[in-house]
Image (cartoon, helix red, strand yellow):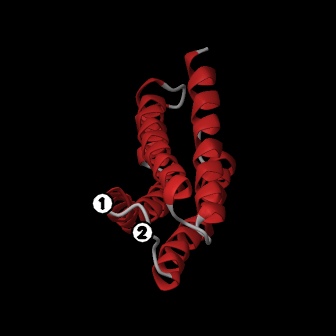
Amino acid sequence: MTDLLLAILHHLLAFALVAILAAQFALIRPPLAGAALARLARLDAAYGATAGLLIAVGVARLIWGARGADYYLSDPWFWAKMAAFAAIGGLSAMPTVTLIRWRKAAQDDPAFAPTAEARQRVRRFIAGELALVPVVLACAAAMARYGTF
């Protein structure tokens, strides 16, 4: 039963992470100031918290799941999935740092709005994160199909 609950939670968190990322991508458009910028910053915080929970539940599955750590740690698809997830995490750093900067600038100057170029740069990074999601999903499917139990 623990394995099932961890698997359900892991999948729910993964889909929540993608939904938050898609919402961020959609919100990075003009006008991006005031309340919209604050909403985007809250979404980014939710993204970070969800990613942290996803990792924690993934580690719990590794330790307490039915397949055990040896199963996952010896599976090349698991490592490919981890590499893709790490790449997503790496790409997410730039938007997070930028949103923190924008939020501070908006607190200092309520009329602050990021330039179109800055918005596009953040949007490209988020698009890169979204582009890697199918890689993570494909690796997860390969793990389920080609892994040994």
Q: Secondary structure at mark 2?
A: loop
In the picture of the structure, the residue carrying the numbered disc 1 is: 108
Marks 2 and 1: in contact by CB < 8 Å? Answer: yes
Q: Amino acid at mark 1?
A: Asp
* x and y, in percent, of residue 30 in the image: 61, 72
Task: Mark 1: give few (<14), some (14-19) or many (20+) Cα within 10 Å.
Answer: few
Tell which of 20 and 141 is nearer to you. 20
- Residue at image coords 48%, 46%: 42
Q: CA distance from mark 1 to mark 2?
A: 8 Å
Q: Toward the viewer: 68 or 19?
A: 19
Find residue 23 and report its horizontal and vertical position in percent.
64, 55
Q: Which residue is mark 2?
A: 112
Which residue lies at the image location 51% right of the left edge and 26% below the top edge?
65
The answer to whether residue 21 is above or below residue 12 is: below
Q: Quadrant of residue 118?
A: bottom left
Residue 148 position within the rendered picture, expressed as x and y whole percent measured from the top left: 59, 43
Which of these two is toward me, 70 or 37? 37
Which percent across, then down, holds residue 47? 49, 47
Tag count in the figure?
Answer: 2
